Image: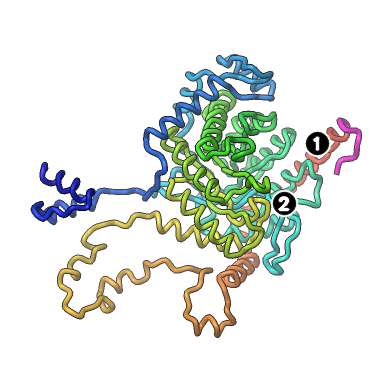
Amino acid sequence: MEQLTTTRKNRRRGRASPEAPAIPAADAFTLARTPCARPGFDFLSDGDVAVFRARAIELIADHGIVVTHPEAFKTLKALGGRDGRDPGRLLLPRELVEEALAETPKSVALCGKLPTRDISLPRADGGFIMRTGTGAHGFVDPETSEYRKVTVDDVATIASVANHLDEVGFIAHPFVHGVPVLTSDIHSLAALIARTDKHVWIQPYNKENVEYLFRLAAIAAGGEAELRARPLASCITCSFSPLEFKVMDAEVIIQAGRFGIPLHACSLPSAGGTAPLTVPGLVLMAAAEIIAMVTMAHVLAPGTPVIATPLMFTLDMRTGSALQACVESRQAATMAIQVMKRGFGLITHTYGSGSDTPDVDVQSTSERALLGHDVALAGADILGGVGQLECATVFSPVQAVLDNELGAMMRRFVQVPKIDDESLNWNEIVGIRAGGHFLDSLHTLKYCRSQFVPSAFLRQDRDGYEACGRRTAFDQARDICLELMAMPPPRGLPDETAIAEMADVVALADKHILEAAEANTGANVV
């Protein structure tokens, strides 16, 4: 053992050790078989993670958070919260934070309309799922490549494409135009949830809208009890960086507890704006805000699953534009996932697709490939942003097809191959003759169909490329997208009665929310 240790030291120093004995073949084989569930990439040591954990808790315990929801503020204060130095600021007791972290569920079910669409996180294979981009105001038409504002009809297109993208586990609704602005989210969710059999992600825009959105989910599920038993929707709740929480987001937490809807606790800090410019400072802000939301959920909606969702942005100091795919944002997302998983034991969700360019181009593909690869290796459970462009403000169905392909490649990459004599093809390797090959090997024949085969990305030589008119992966992805748009709807969608009931909820929301807004402002709201 001493000699082996000396050999390792010498190798690290660049010196050979001819006197050291070789490791016996059996021992080498045993070492090679050490199981690895998922390859990883770590920026942070265990000590670094411990620092982030301690500082995040210290920040919300000693500096505190601002909670503007009166009921939430009162409840948190009754459980030991103390007044901070600003109005509405609460110092959350360390004991309460630690209790919340210990009791928050460490697994979550994101259900579809049929059990075949159900998602259990963390995945048994250690992998990830993907979801479409949300909140986009713009849309790139898949047939003409023209840009326009998103409409309700475009929601149907997003659903029809995403329904058939295997890597997309759930779908988010965009911001739609052509309907009342104050109830755009309600119109959009109603259109989406009636057209997909997959799990949906809800993003409310106003406090008054939250209950209507959850009622739509309950109708689609068959009732509130059915929704609690099989949550076919989950919802985002956000911080208002730095360290503030709006009335709407506290209301989301309260209502999620009532309807049994899992939460994505989302921090969206911008380095240099709402968070420190440095990457570690940005990560700390996200960690503290997410842990504050975990604590709020533990108090306001006990037992509700919470998914840690750091969505990291960096301000371009030259222009003030927010960036999601720059080096700093990618590094921050990777570190934040490691902190939330290793430091707090939470399920994690971040952007795994997206770019800072407005078009489906070389830059977009490069940025999203780097971003997805980084956070996948960091261990993220959910990779968001499929189809989104221009820093999450535009949705492109063609880009979604390409993202699905990238996701399939990343999923294959993070699956660790089994290491044994069969995978090594040991028996044939030790018997290979001089000048031999494996083209006619039975082992090759057995596994020749196990390779990853792309559907959108092309593998062709120069002659084939020229012969087909220099067709690109974009052209192939657009054809796939148009085919998916023409496919029939999936099974398990809400029936006509449920769709009519959802239409009534939308109409009621328009009436009550718009009338209340007009009464408050004295102006006609459209």
Q: Which residues are magenta?
A: 519-526
What kind of residue is marked 1? Ile
What residue is shown with label 2? 137
Position of residue 13 measured from the top left corner of the image (x, y, whole percent): 22, 49
Is residue 413 left or right of 138 when viewed as pictured? left
447 to 35, vertically: above or below: below
Position of residue 86 measured from the top left corner of the image (x, y, whole percent): 66, 19
Q: Please name the residue shown 68% across and 48% down the image.
A: 319
Position of residue 15 measured from the top left corner of the image (x, y, whole percent): 18, 53
In this rendered view, identify the residue nearer to me: 318 or 462: 318
282 to 127, vertically: above or below: above
Is residue 184 left or right of 235 when viewed as pictured? right
Quadrant in which the N terminus appears = top left
Q: Is residue 306 magenta?
A: no
Q: Please name the residue shown 42% across and 34% down the image.
A: 49
Judged by depth in the image, the label closer to the viewer, 1 or 2, is: 2
Is residue 182 left or right of 392 when viewed as pictured? right
What residue is shown with label 1? 513
Say few, some or many: other residues with alpha carbon within 10 Å of mark 1 (under 14 / 14 to 19 / 20 or more): some
Looking at the rendered structure, the secondary structure element under dot 2 is loop
